[in-house]
Amino acid sequence: MKKLFVAAIVAFAGFTATQAQASVNKLEMVSVQDSVVKTPIEVSALPDAIKTVLQTDPYKDWTPTAAFSVKDGDKAYFQVDVKKAEEMASLKFDAEGKPVEFSGASVAAAQASINEMVAVQDSVIKTPIEMSALPDAIKTVLATEPYKAWTPTAAFSVKDGDKAYFQVDVKKEEETASLKFDAEGKPVE
């Protein structure tokens, strides 16, 4: 009976170790996905072409709140976080002020796509919250590898259609990233 009990404990420990390794691997995958280098810059430091675009429709009703120079592999672009009333959105432009998703499109197609992009972004409601208001499960995850090397700088409650999640912006030295979690602390894609 004693041998059976010891065998059960060893089997359980092996199962637990396997599950723990699977969890660690999942976390490592998220950190690789967040390898985009986002460097904060002043809104005033944006290229003039982007500043000009932000003063035209459909952007002129939005107020820039933050700006970033972004390097994603061999791609480089600027991200401008904007706000209108309680709504927030992130816009991405190349140095010439063209949205990065549409840089190869015709001007008419690009403008139609921009209007559609802003309308889609309008449906996302991103509400700033205090770090202390994050669910305990997310706070626990942020205290583990690979996240504990990063410093949380801002937190948001996000509603995207029927989806709800939390976004935590983090910084490590000059790198920044945005992490998304459900209320149970599981990464959201």
Image (cartoon, rainbow, N blue to C red):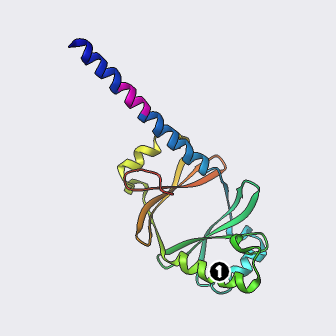
Image quadrant containing the N terminus: top left
Q: Secondary structure at mark 1?
A: helix
Q: Residue 180, image x and y in percent?
A: 49, 56
Q: Is residue 17 magenta?
A: yes
Percent x, y for residue 147?
A: 52, 44
Q: Residue, x 34% and y 20% (percent of image)?
A: 10
Apparent side of residue 15 relative to residue 54 in the rendered image (left or right): left
Q: Who's the residue at 56% across and 45% down the image?
A: 29
At which x and y percent is residue 42? 68, 65
Image location (x, y in percent) of residue 149: 55, 41
Total labels drawn? 1
Indicate yes or no whether the magenta region holds residue 58: no
Quarter holding residue 47: bottom right
Tell me which secondary structure the magenta stretch mostly adopts.
Answer: helix
Left or right of 169, for residue 38: right
Say what amino acid the circle numbered 1 marks.
Answer: Ile
Q: Residue furthest left?
A: 1
20 sits left or right of 58 in the view: left
Judge whether 35 appears above or below 12 on screen: below
Q: Quadrant of residue 94?
A: bottom right
Q: What residue does disc 1 label? A: 114
Q: Residue at x 56, y 72 (%)?
A: 89
- Looking at the picture, does residue 8 appear above or below residue 108? above
